[in-house]
Image: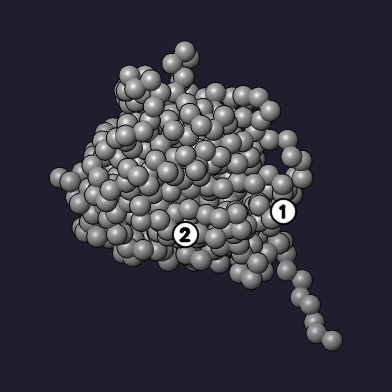
Amino acid sequence: MSNYFYVAPEQLIKDRAEFAQKGIARGRSIVAAIYDVGVLMVAENPSASLYKISEIYDRIAFAGVGKYNEFDRLREAGIRWADGTGYTYSREDVDARALANFYAHHLGDMFTEGQKPLEVEIMVAQLGNKFRPTKLYRIAYEGTISDEADFAVLGGDAETIKGRFADLEVGHLSLSQTLKNAVSALAGPDRHLPVEDLEVGVLEDQGDRRTFSRLSDEQIALLLT
Amino acid sequence: MGLPLFDAQSDPGPSFVRFAEMTGLTLPPSTSDLSAHATTVVAVRFAEGVVMVADRQATSYYVANRDVRKIEAADRFTALAISGSAARGLEFIRLAQLSFEHYEKMTDSSLSLEGKANYLSPLIQRNNLTTTLVVLPLLAGWDLAHQTGRIFEYDGAGGCYERQDFSVIGSGSPFADSTLRLGFRTGMSRDEALALAALAIYEAADNDPSTGGPDFVRSIFPMMVTLTSDGFRELEHATAAETFRLINDRRAESGGVAGGALR
């Protein structure tokens, strides 16, 4: 017979949290911010095909940091949930808050009951309209959900980057200025981030039903000058 | 609906229909035969793309609706038209639109035009073999990879065939088809293709009681669409009105006789 050792619940939670934090800290960060007419998401991502930011629905976007396979599975589930809900009811009934809550439940369950907690931190962003507000929901590895007012930072170095960005961004600025601030907050004082290492997604009304767009390297370079 | 997570073995992939079936979002096919149907839709290739024209009438034992939209944009560069059961047809369009968008979001790349055409085959097959409400679609679009307009038509069992010239669906097909056969030339201009396609619908409406012609009383005119490198464009009401008024005036001048030149 094998021996079972008693582990205090406090210790168990602490160990699991440390494990998840370590995994998340290994990856690069993401800044999401509301600008005057939309929502901007900027990731430091050297890969041009393994995206961290993507479209979920007409006015909803997703961003994730940490283990790629884990947050990509959450992204796919989000798209399925949104398309399924819109198909069953109406496109207007797809709400980011409901999706963020589902994510929070799942991450919370995995943290306490899963084989291991998910090493991810995710964000659900919603571009507002007449019926719904513009929102940024940040969901942490243990299922904590927070409703961020103007901007949010995901990833290991979040606090430092958050501080740098808060110093630059006052109120809701233009897309170009917000992008500049986000990039300089991500880079910090000693680094320069080349355009090829940036992944930028935007939610903005352009007259179409779908509002998400991915900015190309040329578009990013133009906005940064 | 909860958060739809799947393990790697049971994952439905980027297909919305497979996902919807697995989770019970789509209802089992009905066996009722209550339906409004009968239609004529034509698609004609021209030098820079494809034009499509469709009548607007839904017919059961009587006229059920006079301003149905039988052509819809499946996405920015693709149009989908339906004939047959209106109920199943509109659902078919909704499912196709959603499927193409779902695939695009899941994989971060759009389906090729041929991929979209092939995707519809099993949907048609399943619908037509399991219900008495038959739906036949017509898919046309601008192929971004090959920079050309393309038309795909289907048979009742889901077979998909690409057409190089033109295609016709619906109860008024024989009359529209004859008009297009006589009038079609390769490399037509956009305006020539639109005029010919409109004439085909006019002929179909003239001879088939279940196809609605231009309705000058209510100012409802067949829907006219172009698919080019600019994507899906629906022509304005005034343009469609003018096109059909011209045909009608010529026909009145000749006392209703269509023969002679194509007019």
Q: Chain of mark 2?
A: B
Q: Position of residue A55 (x, y in %)?
A: 44, 48
Tell me which residue sits at (56%, 40%) in the image.
B171
Residue B130 is labelled as 1
Q: Position of residue B113 (x, y in %)?
A: 40, 56
Task: Classify B252 as above or below A40.
Answer: above
Any part of residue B118 in sight: yes
Any part of residue A143 in sight: no
Q: Label 2 vs label 1: CA separation? A: 22 Å
Q: Quick one: label 2 or label 1, which is nearer the N terminus?
A: 1
Bin the neighbour count of mark 2 within 10 Å (Cα to Cα): few under 14, some 14-19, many 20 and up: few
**Helix, strand or loop for disc 2:** strand
Q: Is residue B104 left or right of residue A87?
A: left
Q: Position of residue B64 (x, y in %)?
A: 63, 25
**Disc 2 marks which amino acid?**
Tyr
Q: Chain of mark 1?
A: B
